[in-house]
Image (cartoon, coloured by chain):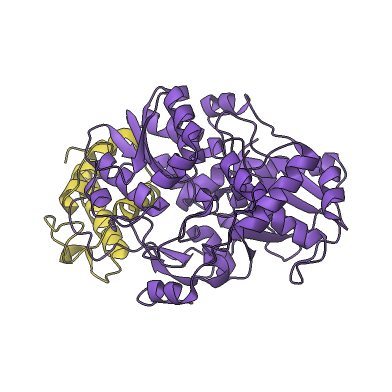
Chain colours: A yellow, B purple
Amino acid sequence: MTPTQARRAEVNDAVKRIVALESRLSLAPHEIPDAEPLNGDLLKVNSLGFLGMLVRLEDELDVTLPDDLFTGRTFHTVADLTGVVLLAVGEQP
Amino acid sequence: MRWRSVLPRLGYELPPDLTPPSANGPLTPSVPLELIRQSVSAREYWDIPEPVAEQYRRYRPTPLWRATAFERAIGAEVPVYVKYEGGNISGSHKLNTALAQAYYYQRAGVRELVTGTGAGQWGTALAAACAAFGLSCTVFMVGGSLRDKPYRGSLMRLLGAQVHASPSGLTEIGNQGGGNSLALAIGEAVEYAKAGEGRAFCIGSGENYSILHQSVIGQEAIEQLSTMDAEVDTVIGCVGAGSNFGGIALPFFSCDDQGPTLLAAESSSTPKLTRGVYAYDLTDATGTGPMEAMYTIGSQYSIPASHSAGLRFHGAAKLLSAMRHRGQIAATAVGQRAALEAGRAFAGSELIVPAPESGHALAAAASVVTGRDAKHRGGRGVLVCVSGHGLLDLAAYDQLLAGQLTDLAADPEAVELATAALTRVDNTLVEVN
C-alpha cells in the first residue's frame, strides 16, 4: 500500500468509526458503505453533531480543518464527508 | 482577558445531542468550526481574536459597584454588588457573543446572519455585530414583543437589519400557526436561513460557545471584586436559556463546593429549572435541529405572554441543565410583578432602569439579602448581573405603575402534558477522572 493509499484508508476508517459513534451504532468501518446516507435509515447524524464529528476527526487525524470548508456545502453520504476531509488533509478524494 | 470555559472543570461530559426522528435528509452545516471547537473542547482558556477584542474595548470592562442605595431601598442585610451589562448599543450582555459569532461567521464566508429574538436584545446585538463585521442581518422577532417595543425594531433597522414580526408569513413554520413564542421566531429564522445562499442561522443564548463568550462578565467581576476587597457567597443572574447567568456565574464555579452559590432566577411563567423535567427536547419550532438534554417545560407548551420576552423560552441551556441536574447550580422562580417591582426599586435608587428580565435577578437578590428566601442565604455579599437596560421596556413599567400587571404562572397540568412524551435523560453521565 502506498503512503497515499494508507492515508486514504486511515481517513476512510476514521470517518466511518465516528459516524457510527455519532449514530450510537456499534458497527465496524467496513460495515458502513461509502454511499450510506449520513442522515437516513441507518446513520443518524444531525448538522451540529456533524460539526462535532469534524472536531473529533481533527483530533484523531491531527489536522486542522478550515472554517470555510463546509460553508454552503450539502453532505448526503459518508463518501461526501470522507472526500472533504481528504481534501483538507491534502489528498484527492 | 481570555474567554474561560467551564467544561473542563465540570468533572463529567454533557449528554450528547440527539437527531430528531423526523429529520432525515442531507446535512447543510453552517456553524463555523471554531464555534464547535469552543463548544466541545476540554480547553479552558480561549484567546479572544483581536477584531473582537477591539470591539469589546468600546464598552468593556463594564461597571461593577456596590449598590448601597438599592440596599437601603430594599432593607438588605448584606451587601449587594451589581455588574451592569446594559451600557452598549444593544443595551444588553448579548453583544458579547454577537460580536464573536459575527466575526467567526464572516471569516467562514457567510454573508448574511439570520436569527430569532424574543425581547429584541439579541436581535439588536446581532444587528450591531453584523454592522461591525460587514454582514447583512435578518431578524425574526416575537410579534407581540415587537408590537410592545417598536423602538427595538427601529434600533435594529437603524443598524441595517431587516426585521420581521413573527409569525411573519414568510415561512412555512410561521404559516402553520403555533403561537407567539421565541421557539417559533427561531424556527422561522432556521427555515429562512436554509432557503438562501450565503445565509446562516445563529443563536444567542443556549449554546456552549455563547456561554463561553459571556465568561468575560464573570471574569471581570472577579477582578473588580478583588480590587474592592469584596467577597460574595451568592451570584445571581436571570435565565432565559442561560447566557448571562452562565457569563456571570460560571467563572465563579468551583468543583470542590467552596465557591459561591450560583443562583439562576427564572420567570415563573417558564419555570424549567424549578418545575421542568430533565429530558431531551427540541430547541426550535421546526423540529429539525438537534434534540438537547435540557430542563424543559416542553417545547409544545404554550408560554403565556409576559414582559420578559427574553425569558420566554421553554428550556435551559444544556450546560446549565447538566449543572442543575448535578446540584452545581441553584434556581428560583420569580413572577413578573415582583421582577418589575425590584426593577422600580433599582431605578429609583441606583438611577438605572433595568430590563424586566434583569428585574428577575434583582428580585431574587432582594429575597436573598433580606432573608425572605429561606433556601438561599447571602452572608458576606451577593453579586447580581443586571444584564440589560429597560429603556425600551417602559410600557411594562407603565403597566406596573398603573396597577395593571399580573403574574402568569405556568399551568402545572399543561406543563405535565407538554413534557409527558419526552425522553428523560439517562442518569449515567460519563464521569471524567
Front residue (pair B42, B410): B410
Residue at image coords 14%, 58%: A36
Q: Name the quadrant of the C terminus of chain B.
A: bottom right
Front residue (pair B214, A86): B214
Q: Position of residue B214 (x, y in %)?
A: 58, 43
Q: Could you tell me if residue B259 is visible in this image?
A: no
Residue A57 relative to residue B316: left or right: left
Q: Could you tell me if residue B298 is visible in this image?
A: yes
Q: Position of residue B238 (x, y in %)?
A: 61, 53
Residue at image coords 56%, 25%: B55
Front residue (pair B104, A65): B104
Residue B289 relative to residue B26: left or right: right
Residue B26 relative to residue B259: left or right: left
Q: Name the quadrant of the N terminus of chain B.
A: top right
Q: Position of residue A21 (x, y in %)?
A: 31, 64
Q: Quadrant of residue B287?
A: bottom left
Q: Compared to B173, does B262 lie above or below?
A: below
Circle count? 0
